[in-house]
Amino acid sequence: MLRLAVLILLIMLIYAGLYSVISIIKPEVIVGSTIKGAVSKSLDEAQYDGYLKAFLALCRDAGIFGLAATISGIFILFTGFRKAYKWAWFAFLIGGGIAWLGGLILAIFISDFLNTLIRLVGTGLSVLGLFLPFKAFFGKKQEETETTV
């Protein structure tokens, strides 16, 4: 189960990385959906309001942070999670919870369909990857090996 969870979380991290790269290179895709959901205007209509440049810059900035978090997640996945270290499980739980669930709640709140869909997939992969190997991290065997070491 642990190997399958590592594969699922790796897919989730690649997915998050692609989302971040799209946010950096082509933020119009992400921002267009957000503007439509938040203010019911198309991207073309919003550019006349003068705020579009700021939205695009913020999206690129968020993409850079997301890419950095994804790279950090890859290191955590292969240095700690793969070896069933509890700290790595909690790092994915807390980091993934803030990133995926926080963004999902915001996207739902402003009726942003594209970002809601993207975040639902990411949340699903994250939850599946975390709870599939739960026994490997918190099962009785884990506790016995910790006390004998």
Image: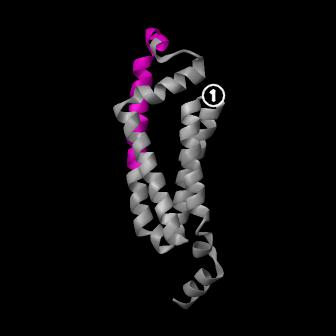
Placement of 76 over or under 138, stated as above or below: above
Query: At x 59% / y 33%, what residue is drawn?
Result: 107
In the rendered structure, does residue 142 fall within the stretch colored magenta? no
**What residue is at 49 percent from the left and 58 percent from the top?**
9
Q: Horizontal placement of 135 versus 149: left or right?
A: right
Colouring convention used in this rendered image of the protein? one colour
Mark 1 is surrounded, within 10 Å at the Cα level, by few (under 14), some (14 to 19) or many (20 or more) other residues, namely some
Q: Quadrant of residue 54?
A: top left
Residue in the foreground of this view, choosing between 120 and 83: 120
- The part of the chain drawn in magenta is 45-69
36 left or right of 23? right
User: Furthest-bottom residue in view?
Assistant: 148
Q: What amino acid type is highlighted by mark number 1?
A: Ser
Residue 106 is situated, as x and y percent measured from the top left of the image, at 61, 34
Q: Is residue 50 left or right of residue 2?
A: left
Residue bearing the label numbered 1: 111
